[in-house]
Amino acid sequence: MVGLVDGGAARAVGRLGPGETASGGGGGEADHVRRLHRHAPADHQCTSTLVKHIKAPVHLVSFPFLLLIPLLASYVSGIASLHGSGVPCSIPDALVSDRCVWELVRSFDQPQRYKPFVSRCIVRGDQLEIGSLREVNVKTGLPATTSTERLEQLDDDEHILGVKFVGGDHRLQNYSSIITVHPESIDGRPGTLVIESFVVDVPDGNTKDETCYFVEAVIKCNLTSLAEVSERLAVQSPTSPLEH
């Protein structure tokens, strides 16, 4: 197993057998795993969960908008008092930067933004929605060249992305992954806890350990790259962290 320090390598928090449930690592981490990373592996499948701490916020919001927050709060409070009820107020999507962790993770149509083994991605159809399919081309060096993948979950409130492999020339049959993004504090600054879990068939001729080690190695590379890209963009971006 790879050890973990904040901002260091991704860590596998556990592998599960049939009928077992995820226990996770630390308190909040374990709660997220139990609540959002539910897999039910069969006898011929393996599953694992990995975590990564990233020194970049879940979201960034454009700096000019931050100057308007006191005015908006006063305005909403005034309307609420007139109508005798609360008035929902949300941050316009246009003011949320596409340069931090969740915005990178949720880019089902552009996984190459942070995944180093993806060379090209084409999404079928005009709309990005649950059930959308993407055709991914994989860079040389891996035992595959293409993968067809379906969007299973996309929740911008809970920050959940779920993907299932439905075709391609790889051996990862019935591969399904869930990745979730959670705000946390690292060294007193806004950071992000990323959790990724998967379940997959064990190919003929391989063991569960061999299959898990291979998939974990790919995910660790992806999460390391996600951290590097997010942290670099957070430093470069003329925006401020949005606690979400």
Image (cartoon, helix red, strand yellow):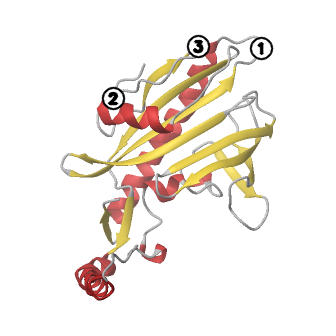
Residue 48 lies left or right of residue 148; in this view the side is left
Number of residues whose C-alpha sits closer than 10 Å to that of mark 3, classed few (under 14), some (14–19) or many (20 or more): few
Which amino acid, by three-letter code, is at mark 1? Asp
Name the mark on residue 67: none
Q: Which residue is mark 3?
A: 209
Badge 3 vs badge 2, beta-carbon distance below 8 Å: no
The foreground one among 189 and 92 is 92
Q: Earlier in the sequence, mark 3 or mark 2?
A: 2
Q: Which residue is mark 1?
A: 204
| Residue 168 pos. (x, y %) | 80, 38
Which amino acid, by three-letter code, is at mark 3? Asp
User: Quadrant where the C terminus lies?
Assistant: bottom left
Q: Earlier in the sequence, mark 3 or mark 1?
A: 1
Q: Which residue is mark 2?
A: 4
Taking the view exactly as shown, the residue that stands out farthest to the front is 84
| Residue 11 pos. (x, y %) | 41, 28
Which amino acid, by three-letter code, is at mark 2? Leu
* Disc 2 secondary structure class: loop
